[in-house]
Image (spheres, grey):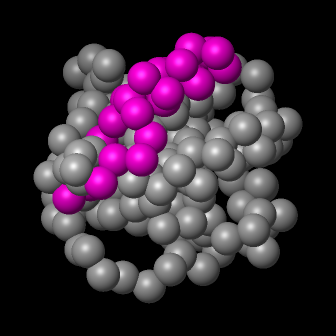
Amino acid sequence: KNVRLPFLGVGKSCLLLQFTDKRFQPVHDLTIGVEFGARMVNIDGKQIKLQIWDTAGQESFRSITRSYYRGAAGALLVYDITRRETFNHLTSWLEDARQHSSSNMVIMLIGNKSDLESRRDVKREEGEAFAREHGLIFMETSAKTACNVEEVLLGKE
């Protein structure tokens, strides 16, 4: 399974690192192009290698990262709950995901940085409403505290 993580500076790389290595690294370089992570998981008694493609959020890499939708089982549209502009760009990224993927790809909407509740700029209800309107699964996560990271990447609500 492949999962795509779009947007700049919302914590995609931190989510990947938390899932694959169970650690949080607050300072790291911006993703240039695509980074790859993998982890063996047990699903229904079967060992499955979950491959995660962490794509750059910069607009300049968008044409390159579009190819990573092909063959993906799922995509995570990640926004930062403390930065409204990341939420405001969801429609554009969702159109990209739907246009360049198979019709049966599962798409989840992820509001990241839930540990920063005091700095919240996007209400949980807004994320839920966007997800409901577009037929997406919704969850909030914190790559820092690992809250809901396993649940999101293993597809558990």
Viewer can see residue 55: no
Residue 3 falls within the magenta-colored stretch = no
Q: How many marks?
A: 0
Report the side of 18 relative to 65 (left or right).
left
Query: Where in the figure is residue 40, as x and y percent of width and height?
Result: 29, 46
Q: Is residue 128 magenta?
A: yes
**Which quarter shows the C terminus?**
top left
Question: Toward the viewer: 133 or 42?
Answer: 133
Q: Is residue 72 above or below residue 84?
A: above
Q: Residue at x 68, y 49 (%)?
A: 89
Left or right of 121 in this view: 102: right
Residue 122 spot, x, y in % from top left = 44, 41
* Residue span colored magenta: 119-144
Closest to the observer, 54 or 95:
95
Q: Residue 5: where, in percent of width, then height?
A: 54, 52
Q: Quadrant of residue 123?
A: top left
User: Quadrant of residue 151 in the image?
Assistant: top left
- The residue lying at 53 percent from left, 50 percent from top is 84
Q: Is residue 72 left or right of residue 150?
A: right
